[in-house]
Image: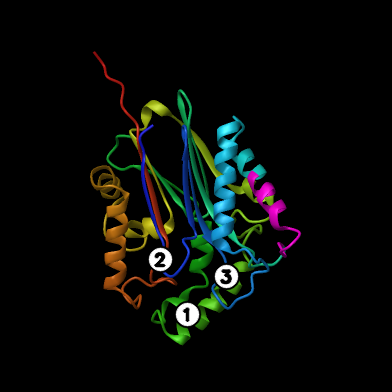
Amino acid sequence: MRLSLATESSSPSRPNEDFVGVTSGAVVLLDGAGTPGGMESGCSHGVAWYARMLGSTLLAEVTQSVASLTELLTRSIKTVASLHDFTCDLTHPGTPSATVAMLRRTDDSLEWLVLADSVIILDTGTAEPTVLSDDRLERIGALHRAELDALPNGTPEHTEALRRYIEVMNGHRNREGGFWTASADPLAAEQSLTGTVPADQVRAAALLSDGASRLTDLFGLVTWRRLLDLLAHDGPQELITRVRAAEHDDPRGTRWPRHKTHDDATAAFWPFPQPRHP
């Protein structure tokens, strides 16, 4: 198994709330989410802790079990909830959560799972790769983001609009008709998008947190095909470097409105050797 990865916090002064881990035949990537500083979350541990705990638990599960990825996520959410349900209010709407992207390769198939807005890209040798994503968070967010997008990043007005936006979004999280993330309720795992593709049809795969995928799906600076080529030739760190360059060119979010000027960014690239034919 040959795989390259990179992860970088949005700022040297902030903990990285992404998680990426690799085990034999599987990759797990999480993007932690919660409330900004100054807002109550009901949890004393924080988002980075939650992402690390859930990610490491998922890695252990995928190593030890052949159960479906959905079942492994269900078990892992339950396990992590049990680690802090006696000290934290897990019913609080701002309790830490995370997106999930998982890939597992067996002898003849590649299983995938996505929950919330992390992205998996499969290079199947066609002109355009297959992009696997859960757009429910984006669709709900688009209905409530107009005020936030109209304000320059870094201003008191933007900070206050972000607080209101997050409060509204918390009311849609892990509810029917809303969007779903891994948090305290193991039933959220049942809302994951999953699938299986023949392993011999995939040349390479990439897993991206939304802080890394924004080069394409937010900034529109490269196509998904070009992004895959960039990962293959220059590696995940170069992708993050280009994301940071674009962010620095638009510090106020006027060209690309976004609630975070900089975001934690994580990318993993997994090439699959192709069989040689005589």
Is 31 in front, or is 118? 31
218 to 102, vertically: above or below: below
Q: Secondary structure at mark 2?
A: loop
Decide: few, some or many residues near mark 2? Use Cα within 10 Å; few <14, some 14-19, many ≥20: some
What amino acid is at disc 1? Glu
- Disc 1 on helix, strand or loop? helix
Q: Is residue 60 left or right of residue 259?
A: right
Q: Which residues are magenta?
A: 76-90
Task: For mark 3, give the secondary structure.
Answer: loop
The quadrant in which residue 85 appears is bottom right
**Label 1–label 3 contact, CB within 8 A:** no
Residue 234 placement, left or right of 41: left
Q: CA distance from mark 1 to mark 2?
A: 23 Å
Residue tagged 1 = 147
Quadrant of the drawing holding the N terminus: top left
Disc 1: CA contacts within 10 A as few (<14), some (14-19) or many (>=20): few
Residue at the disc numbered 3: 35
Q: Counting residues from the N terminus, which is met first, the one under dot 2 or under dot 3?
A: 2
Q: Position of residue 142 (x, y in %)?
A: 48, 67
How much space separates mark 1 and mark 3, taking CA atoms? 19 Å
Outermost residue on the front side: it is 13
For disc 2, the marked residue is 10
Q: Horizontal and vertical percent for residue 47?
A: 56, 62
Of the numbered discs 1 and 3, the one sitting upstream in the chain is 3
Instruction: Determine the image quadrant of residue 184.
Output: bottom right
Q: Earlier in the sequence, mark 1 or mark 2?
A: 2
Dominant SS type (magenta): helix
Image location of residue 100, percent across then percent down: 53, 50
